Image (spheres, rainbow, N blue to C red):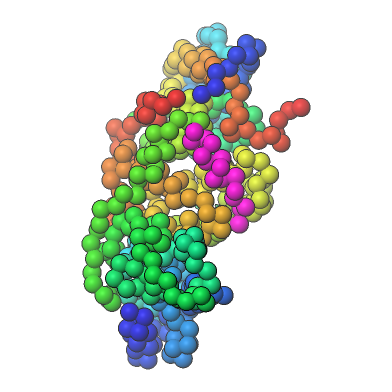
Amino acid sequence: MQEAMKARAKELLADGSVNRVAGWKIGEFSYDITPAIFETAEEIDRDFVYDDFCGANLSKYLISQSRKEGKILVFLKPCDSYSFAQLLKEHRIIRENVYIIGIECYGKADINKIREKGIDGVLGIKESGSSFVIDSIYGEATVPKMDVYAERCLVCKSKKHAVYDELIGEEGDVVPSSRFDKVAELEAMTPDERFEFWRGELSRCIRCNACRNVCPACSCENCVFDNPNSGIANKAAADSFEENMFHIIRAFHVAGRCTDCGECSRVCPQNIPLHLLNRKFIKDINEFYGEYQAGENPDEKAPLTNFTFDDCEPSIVYKRGGNQ
Amino acid sequence: MQVNDNKDFQPTIVAFCCNWCSYAGADLSGTNRLQYPANVKIIRIPCSCRLNPIFILRAFQRGADGVILCGCHPGDCHYTTGNYYARRRMSLLFSMLDYLGIEKERTRVEWVSAAEGAKFAATMNEFVDAVTKLGRNHRLEDLRCKKQ
Ligand code: SF4
Ligand code: SF4
Ligand code: FES
């Protein structure tokens, strides 16, 4: 896969169809892969990687990249392509300046889960059937994929690309996903239990803003949280109120636009399950206003910029789930 | 859910009222000498859809125990459709508050027209009662904003 991608990227660079390539390269360690822009075939040969740690979603970078001179090639996994399509729908990306190669994806590994298995000093990862073979300074280890898949890959909603110019690998399908199970589990708890659960999670937040910065939907040029008068601009929370405020508002701002790509939870250094906040909104939107998948259909109106005359009243919230 | 046993507790209620309907409705209930508790603080907004969710959270932060939004009846919005958008936003926001374990009874939306002075007073009385039962807002308070 990696070799096919490299070859195609070099081909497109050579014939002048694109002048830059957005892909991934190894960061400080082999498992911390970072997004990168390549301009020459030499750079691609030297640095370009595509392996089972390439979780990073490249679509957000195209907001600025597509405004630069010339065309850029980007590789998108199925879930990334939903974010791309959603940004396109919001007129944030200049489509003519981007050439998309959709790449097949069977799921990415989560380094934290690998560490939990007692594997340290990771040097590389390969797949083999239903397992990952992990190379480390202590030798090779084989682990079942299911055990170390990133959370979002365990509940992957689609192997089908929302948008692409060409594909490497097989065209997939929308797949059944159990992504709302945990949300339903929380809904079934009492408010006190939920409150405790979320205090336990949100109180760990250090307000690094990584979840906001990585989110393709959270891409306002001026963010409310950068407002020096907001009282909670870019600083660690001094009171539990600030934690709640940041997380409610962050999730609310992406409600109806979040494609559930899972980047927020992936980058959180504190392992806060941010996807559970976003998915709550998605689940509610599906239940209140009909099934909606952000990024899927460019012509469909987003649920929060739309209405019907007989929408439910907010009091529906009191009537639902009689848990007290 | 905590139940309040402090009999002297007077909740602070913030009512965001649309200029074109409920705000006038509040006026009408005043001129008609209908009683509603003095702990309802009215903030006038140009339309129910002006209500940014941050305003609600801010109200709680600064000491509100309950927040109510009053707007024109669906179909009667001065700007035609503002309240339809507000309705969707508030449904989702309230549901999220509930999901975080914050008492959902502390938030409410009510449609009150300029002619419904009596409904305005009744709504406020009822809401103040409901929030009084819940007691002080602890789950969305900011300790730095508390009066000593
Ligand atoms: S938190 Fe809200 S204002 Fe800030 S970038 Fe995200 S969507 Fe924009
Ligand atoms: S990435 Fe995690 S720690 Fe950083 S601001 Fe977001 S939730 Fe908080
Ligand atoms: S003008 Fe009253 S709700 Fe829009």
Let me know if residue A196 is in the magenta part.
yes
How many numbered circles does the render carry? 0
Q: Can residue A219 be seen? A: no
Image x and y of residue B34, in percent: 53, 9
Tell me the quarter of the image containing the C terminus of chain B: top right
Above/below status of A82 relative to A186: below
Task: Find the residue positioned furthest to the right.
Answer: B148
Image x and y of residue A131, in percent: 34, 68
Main secondary-structure element of the magenta-colored stretch: helix
Q: Which quadrant of the figure shows ligand 2?
A: bottom right
In percent of the image, x 55 and y 18: which residue is there?
A: B3
In the picture, measured across the screen, residue A295 lies left or right of residue B139, that is: left
**Is A58 in front, or is B23?**
A58
Q: Can residue A11 be seen? A: yes
- Magenta stretch: give its range: A193-208
**Is B91 in front, or is A4?**
A4
**Is B130 in front, or is A192?**
A192
In percent of the image, x 32 and y 73: which residue is there?
A: A128
In percent of the image, x 53 and y 57: which residue is there?
A: A268
Q: Quadrant of residue A80?
A: bottom left
In the picture, measured across the screen, residue A30 lies left or right of residue A229, that is: left
In the picture, measured across the screen, residue B57 lies left or right of residue A47, that is: right
Above/below status of A172 relative to A46: above
Image x and y of residue A18, in percent: 38, 83
In the picture, measured across the screen, residue A120 lies left or right of residue A295, that is: right
**Is A26 in front, or is A168?**
A26
In percent of the image, x 68 and y 44: which residue is there?
A: A238
